[in-house]
Amino acid sequence: MDPMLAIAHKLKTAESVLLFPHINMDGDALGSSIALCLALRQLGKNCSILIEDDIPEYLAFLNKGYCIRNAEQIPDMSVAVDCGDVSRIDRRKEIFYSAAATACIDHHLLHADFAQDCLVDSAAAATGMLVFQLLEEMGIQFTQEIADALYVAIMTDTGSFRYSNADRRTHLIIARLYEYGLDHVPLCNAIYDNVPLTQVKLEAKAMDNMEIFANGRACIAHSTLEMIEAAGATPDQTENIIDRLRSIRDVEIAIFLKEKPDGNYKASFRAKSYADVGTLAYRLGGGGHRKAAGCTVAAPLEEAMRILMNAAEEELNR
Amino acid sequence: MDPMLAIAHKLKTAESVLLFPHINMDGDALGSSIALCLALRQLGKNCSILIEDDIPEYLAFLNKGYCIRNAEQIPDMSVAVDCGDVSRIDRRKEIFYSAAATACIDHHLLHADFAQDCLVDSAAAATGMLVFQLLEEMGIQFTQEIADALYVAIMTDTGSFRYSNADRRTHLIIARLYEYGLDHVPLCNAIYDNVPLTQVKLEAKAMDNMEIFANGRACIAHSTLEMIEAAGATPDQTENIIDRLRSIRDVEIAIFLKEKPDGNYKASFRAKSYADVGTLAYRLGGGGHRKAAGCTVAAPLEEAMRILMNAAEEELNR
């Protein structure tokens, strides 16, 4: 049976459903879960989103009482949302598998089936695209709130439609969401135009110490605990700096170093087209993907910079 | 007669056409002009884009020999593209009006008709949307190059579909462009991941002089000719600063001031949700849209800042 039809059927039969977005949830995991939760509540189901870690600050506005931290009862059905692997529902595994019916809706490339019914389409730009289709299949009445949640899911996972996963289908679904009352402006404002002033100041300071090396093919910048304190910022406010470094012309490898509370440095790497920073990070005891990776360097700033710059030069000369 | 039909008819009759994007051209002006130029060349017309200033560096990849600086002959038809006012084809006015037929295709709010046929729709997210419809009306065979040019026009003018002008129609047209072979990834890389180092340095300096006012609801930053020179940058490399200012939490009005060669200042405004910077700019002798507008202030920096800060406070208190 087609997994979409199987999941639609089981959801209609279930009286209580728990949804499981992945840990370190992003816009797709939370937005897709909220859209599905709203749809199931519309059908009169007892439905909540079970989480085990915090909702990121930039997404908190989406949660209007849908998320719970402790399940009150064993659900009839459990649905993992945007999870490629069971490790991503880590501390919720037991309650997930306690349900009579289990399902997974996901679009990750390396997906391990871990539920009875898996609706997985790695060609979908976002899990939100699959939830849209599922809700259509189920004959749900789309509301503005459902449309808004799906927009956040799809827009964030495609980098505002810029990443290579965005396609014709993505834009067609977004057009449909407008028919259901989507108002994207407050959503984009909440997510993108809501950068704390402290973060703007911290970014400016970090960009100011940026160094270009390897004949312009690599760059490195850093933040220290002192810089974060001076800006009145929080440690997670360094988040966007690595992408700013990556966006510089001719830069193939971007490196951002961030001092940790123990005085060591966390290094983030990005590669633009041909370099493999996954291997680079692995050689330094870290890991990741070819284009995005990281490691920890147990050394003071100058030495950490020297180690990383040498490793990057080596990768570029391979 | 419907201006779209009138322009389509006259373009089909003309043998030579000159296109006039506005001065300080942006992605919409250039992308729309290129799409129209390609379409007219497809019909066997002698068509070029007449420009009077430089193509911004981040858009230079789009121009494959379409732009000329001197008209060789009087065209049968002149078309102003994305121009709300004749002042925006400034030094090309004479050649514009030398044509037997003149037209204007635009989506600006405060638009002054200055041609025989004006296809103006301020509800359109970009002039590229109107050009798309015009080319459909004319029965043009859309190629990937036309689709790519229209994508740049629409994507840049909607801020990657985030601005309030983006709507259902925008996404439907983008979906259509994929059918014609649109490949958005190299376009987004060329525009967004190709920031010159000099621009990064200039942005850092401008962000450093940023001031927050009106109880955090507005901010202002500036670049001087000296700053641009010190960074080794070009004047168009200030382009992204206004969006960075707009993205700050609680900021409703963002203002960026840029010293011009004559020592006066060009002011750019952005509003986030409720303010109307179009009216604000209009009162100061400029123009634009509710959420994005600009004007020129003939005053030294401190006085220009005072004038603009007062105007912004006034708009916020309306």
Image: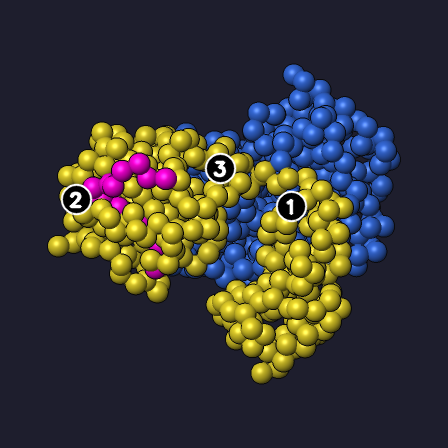
Chain colours: A yellow, B blue
User: Badge 2 is on which residue?
Assistant: A10
Please report, as a chain letter, where disc 3 is located. Answer: A
Give percent across and percent down for residue A299.
Answer: 70, 69
**How would you rate the neighbour count of disc 2 (Cα within 10 Å): few for under 14, some for 14-19, many for 20 or more?**
some
Type of amino acid at the residue the image marks with label 3:
Ala
Give percent across and percent down for residue B69.
Answer: 67, 55
User: Badge 1 is on which residue?
Assistant: A234
Type of amino acid at the residue the image marks with label 1:
Thr
Image quarter of the N terminus of chain A:
bottom left
Q: CA separation, marks 3 and 1?
A: 17 Å
Q: CA separation, marks 2 and 1?
A: 44 Å
**How would you rate the neighbour count of disc 1 (Cα within 10 Å): few for under 14, some for 14-19, many for 20 or more?**
few
Which badge, 3 or 2, comes first in the chain's sequence? Answer: 2
Q: Is there any visible trace of residue B158 in the rendered image?
A: no
| Mark 3 touches mark 1? (CB < 8 Å) | no
Q: Secondary structure beneath disc 2?
A: helix
User: Badge 3 is on which residue?
Assistant: A60
Residue drawn 69% across and 30% down? B216
- Left or right for A276, reference B4: right
Residue drawn 59% across and 38% down? A194
The front one of A79 and B271 is A79
Residue at the top extreme? B318
Give percent across and percent down for residue B292.
Answer: 61, 34
